[in-house]
Amino acid sequence: MEWTMTANAPGQVCLMQGNEAITRGAVEAGIHFAASYPGSPSSQVLGMLGKIAKERGFYAQWSTNEVCALESCMGASLAGARAICIVKQNGLLCTADALFCGAQHGVKGGLVIVTSDDPSAHSSTNEFDSRWQAEGACVPMLEPTIMQEAKDMVPYAFELSERVGQMVIIRLTTRVCHGRGNVTLGPLPDRPESLRTVGEWDRMTCVAYQHEPMLQKLDAIRREFGDSAFNHYEGPDVSKDLIIAGGTGRLYAREAIDRLHVGDRVGLMSLGTLWPLPEDYILERLKTAERVLIVEEVDPFLEQNIQAIAGRNRLSLTFLGRSNGALPRIGELDPENVTAAVAAFAGVPQPKREVPPFDTALPVRDLTFCAGCPHRATFYLLKKIMRQEKLPGIVIGDIGCYFMAGQPAGYYGYQACNCMGSGINMAQGLGQLTAYGMDQKVATICGDSTFFHTILPGLVNAQYHNANMLLLVLDNSATAMTGFQPHPGTGLTAMGDPVKPMDIQKIVEAMGCDVEVADPFDVAETEKTLRRLIQKPGMNVLIMRQPCATLMGKQGRKKARVYVDQDKCLGDGCGCDKYCSRVWGCPGNTWDFTKNKAVIDPVTCVGCGVCAKLCPGGAIQVEGGEA
C-alpha cells in the first residue's frame, strides 16, 4: 500500500481500492493538511495518509469530531495550504454550520471534502444522501464511478477550489470506497509548495453580502462543468430513450444495456459533476428524448433536478426513476434491479437469472458483539437491573459498537437511540421530569471516542442542570467500530506520535460530576456499583473500563483456556434453556445438541472468562491467560 501511495512512478498501473485511489490523488495534489473523524466506508483514507504524512511532508490528524476536522482544514486554507477533510454522510451533517458558512466566505488554499455515503446502511444507521448538502450549501460536488476517476478528481478538485475560491465536495459510495480497479499513477510533487503569509487584511469571514458572490462562483462552475471530461454520452446520435446515471448507477446501466443488446437505441449519459448540474449539456440530450430513466443512489436527487431543467425549458418528457417505482425507493442499486428497470424501460424481456440450487438453506447469522466484548457484560447487567426496578428503567442508546445493544446482542437494552452524541441530551430531558412525577430511573451510554466527539457539551448541560440520570461511559480504549483509530484518550496520533492521553475520569470530575470506575468483567462488584448509582439522585457517571477484546488480541495478549466441565454442566437444568449460547450470546459459547450440553469454541473464544462467572452450575472453567 505505502509504495503505491509514495512512489513517483507516473504511468505505472496499479490495482487500487477506491479509498486508496482517493489517498493517492491527495498525495499527487500535494496536500499540506488532512483531517478526519473515522467513519465507514471511508475510514481508511486518513489512516493511509497518516502513515505516509511524515515521509511526504504534510500533516494528518484524527480530529475529535467532524466539525473540528473541517474547521481545522479551513484554518489551514487561510494560509494557502491545500487541505482535505474526510467524513461519511453522518459526519457531513455534523459539519453543517461550518459547511454553509464556509461556502459563503470561500477559501484561500484548496479545500476538498471527501464524503462517503452508505446505500443500504451497511455500516451506518441510515443511508442519507450527501448530495442535498452540496445543493443546499451551494458547494460544487463531483462523484467518481471508477477508481481512476476517484484518483483524478482529487487534484482537479483542488485546482478548481483554488481557482474559484470555494470548497469542493467529492462524493463516494460504499461500492466505490471498497471496490477495486486499475489506476494509472500520475507524477508526485517534490514537496508541498510553500505557504502564503496571512496578511492583515486577508479575510475568510461569513457575512451576508457574500451570498451573491457565492452564487456567482456557482454559476461559473456550472459553465465549466458543461465541458467536463467527467461527463460523457454513449449511444446513438439521437436517442428517444435516454438513461442518465451517476456513480455506481452508471456501471450497472452500462452492463444492463450490453446484456439486453439495446445500445443501438438507448443512450446513456454519465454524470461525474453532480452539482451544479451542467444544464446546457443535459438539455442538449433532453431535447431529442421522449423518455428518461434516471439511475442513481440513494434519493431521486438527479431525477428532481433534471425534471426541473426540463420544466424550465417547457419540455414534455416521461421521467422514470426511484420516485415512481422504476427502481427501488431505498437501498443499494445492483446489476439485477437496474437490469430489470432498463428491460422494462426498453420494452425487452428481462434475462433469466441463473441461481444455483442449494440442498439446504443458509443459516441466519445474527449480529452480535465480538467474542469477549466487554459491552456484552455491561448490557447484561444493565438489562438485569433496569427491569427489576419498580417501573422499567429507561435506557437511551448512542452510536458505536454498542448500537447493537438495541438488538438481541444487547438484550434489547435500550428504548431510544437518535444520532451520535444525542443519548446524553435525550436522557437529560427525561432526567428533568422527576419534578413532574416521573418515577423511572434513567441511564444513557456512550463510548470513549464518542465521549470526546459530542458527549462533552451534553454532559456540561446535564451536570449544570442537575439532571437525575446515570451516564455509562464504555471505555474500551479504542474507536473500535471503525477500525481502532486513536482518539484523545488513547495517547497516539494519526501519524504514530505518542502524546499524553486525556483522562476521561479527570475530565468528568473537573465538571463537578460524581464519577466512579468499574470493570464490567468483575460482574459481582460492578452489579453492586450499578445498582447503587442508578438509585442515586442527581447527575452520576460510571466509567466501564475494559479494553476491546479484539484490540487486545491484536496486541498479542496471551489467551486463557476456557472450557466446560461436562460432569458439572447442568444442561437444560441450569434454569435457562441453553443459557450459555442463547442467553449470554457470546460467539465463543455454543451448544452441543447431541449431548444437550454447553461447549466452548476454542477458535472463537478469546479467553475473557466472563461466562465462567455467570455459569449457574459452575461448569465453565478458566486456565491461564492474562488479565
Image (cartoon, grey):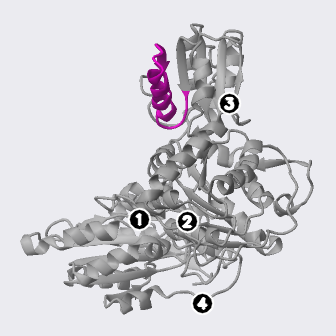
Report how far apart the C-alphas of labels 2 and 1 lie in the structure. Answer: 57 Å
Which mark, residue 99?
none
* 240 is within the stretch colored magenta: no
Disc 2 marks which amino acid? Leu
Q: What is the x, y in percent for residue 203?
A: 55, 69
Which amino acid lies under the numbered mark 4 shown in the image of this protein? Lys
The amino acid type, in three-letter code, at marker 3 is Leu
Say what amino acid the circle numbered 1 marks. Leu
Quarter of the image for the C terminus: give it.
bottom right
Residue 250 versus residue 315 in the image, above or below: below
Task: Tell me how far mark 1 sits from mark 3, CA to CA.
Answer: 57 Å
Q: Please state the horizontal and vertical placement of residue 480, each as a whole percent of the image.
A: 56, 67
Mark 3 crowdedness (10 Å alpha carbons): few <14, some 14-19, many ≥20: some
Image marks 1 and 4: residues in contact by CB distance under 8 Å: no
- Expressed as whole percent of the image width and height from the top left, the position of residue 505 reads 43, 88
Q: Report the mark closest to the observer, 3 or 2.
A: 2
Q: Quadrant of the N terminus?
A: bottom right
Q: Which residue is mark 4?
A: 500
- Give, as a single range, the part of the protein colored magenta: 295-321
Q: Earlier in the sequence, mark 3 or mark 4?
A: 3
- Circle 2: is it few (<14), some (14-19), or many (20+) Cα within 10 Å? many
Residue 195 drawn at (x, y percent): 73, 73
Residue 381 as seen in the image, left or right of residue 552 = left
Q: Which residue is mark 3?
A: 251
Residue corresponding to mark 1: 570
- Which numbered disc, 1 or 4, marks the residue closer to the eye? 4
Give the Cα distance between marks 3 and 2. Answer: 31 Å
N-terminal-most mark, 2 or 4: 2
Residue drawn where x is 26% and y is 69% of the image: 427
Q: Secondary structure at mark 2?
A: helix
